[in-house]
Image (cartoon, helix red, strand yellow):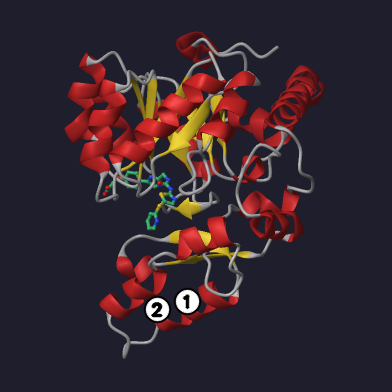
Amino acid sequence: MINSQLTELLGIKYPVFQGGMAWISDANLAAAVSDAGGLGIIAAGNMPGDYVRGQIRRARELTDMPFGVNVMLMSPHADEVAGVVVEERVPVVTTGAGLPTAHMKRWIEAGIKVIPVVPSTGVAKMVERAGAAAVIAEGGESGGHVGDLTTMALVPQVADAVRIPVIAAGGIGDGRGVAAAFMLGAVGVQVGTRFLVAKECGVHQKYKDKILKAKDIDTIVTGRRLGHPVRALKTPFTREFYSKEYDSSISDEELEALGVGALRLAAVEGDEKRGSFLAGQIAGLVKSEQTAKEIIEEMMAEAEELLREAARWVR
Ligand code: TUI
């Protein structure tokens, strides 16, 4: 059993968060992960407040364990969702794709543990000052909206920069990643891509099949020109987007329009031509569909064994 500050802080069995993946992480997946002893997280993504409220209530019907909600700060509905998590008394809120400081006072006063994703030590220190309970240091190996630093470089620097617990994310898909994260100074991990193929994950089967087939070099980052770089599987769509990014005859507006609705097309329709299949670089390591419980238990048993045997490197 790996005990860490994180399991104690949140009252969970395993120090494993399931990433809040827009259009993917719903009440069903979050409840399965929480029931398995991790922290399931409902992704608000670009959804309106009432949808998120419905998902929170559904998760409560499915599990008695704590779960979280991820507030995607670039969403046009972010302010509304920020109110819903207070009204619904969600125990944990994670944030992504921006600075959550404007919402934090209200959340903390409501008793919510706020755990922002941070791409740098500067942002980590800022949210610590604003009262964050922990931070998720997410490296650019992750799927979706990415920062510049790698997990390897980011996690130890954030661990040195703040006193609150650090959760590592980006490129973690098995027990080796978990053990390495602990060595870098983290006390927990957040895992997205591997949970995407969980049996309880309702994403389109074509999306799962693409992850299961992916190799190490099969992801690409697009959107840098627009200021929001996003990692996804290489597909005709992402390759087209990538080439248009470097085409000065195409305006930012045209480029932006190209991406609208692409997450839904991938996750809900499994549209291999026009969908954007967000995935982390670790996709190449994800080889089987398992239940959330199997994923967590396998990962943690492997990590435990590695950490126990780590002394063999020292004489
Ligand atoms: O948020 C994520 N991953 C996401 S959000 C998303 S939905 C989306 N779709 C299209 C375009 C953009 C988003 C898909 N994947 N991960 C957490 C994350 N947060 N990564 C990076 C950051 C971040 C970046 C800057 C957090 C704070 C931050 O603050 C500095 C600033 O300048 O805002």
**Position of residue 12 in the picture relative to residue 217 (left or right):** left
Give the camera-side residue of 135 and 40.
Answer: 40
Give the quadrant of the N terminus.
Answer: top right
Provide the secondary structure element on which disc 1 rests: helix
Tell me which residue sits at (17%, 34%) in the image.
102
Q: Which residue is mark 2?
A: 245
Is residue 124 at all visible to an observer of this figure? yes
Question: Mark 2 to mark 1: distance in Å?
Answer: 5 Å
Is residue 130 at all visible to an observer of this figure? no
**Amino acid type of the residue that numbered disc 1 sits on in the rendered structure:** Tyr
**Position of residue 176 in the picture relative to residue 59 (left or right):** right
**Amino acid type of the residue that numbered disc 2 sits on in the rendered structure:** Glu
Q: Is the C-beta separation of discs 2 and 1 under 8 Å?
A: yes
Provide the secondary structure element on which disc 2 rests: helix
The spot of residue 82 in percent (x, y) is: 25, 33
**Position of residue 250 in the picture relative to residue 174 (left or right):** left
Q: Residues within 10 Å of mark 2 (few under 14, many from 20)?
A: some
Determine whether 296 is above or below 148 in the image. above
Q: Residues within 10 Å of mark 1 (few under 14, many from 20)?
A: some
Q: Which residue is mark 1?
A: 242
The spot of residue 292 in percent (x, y) is: 68, 31
The spot of residue 34 in percent (x, y) is: 57, 22
Tell me which residue sits at (42%, 28%) in the image.
56
Tell me which residue sits at (67%, 40%) in the image.
173
Determine the image quadrant of residue 14. Answer: top right
Give the quadrant of the C terminus.
Answer: top right
Determine whether 86 is above or below 192 in the image. above
Q: How many marks?
A: 2
The spot of residue 49 in percent (x, y) is: 29, 38
**Position of residue 210 in the picture relative to residue 125 (left or right):** right
Tell me which residue sits at (63%, 54%) in the image.
204
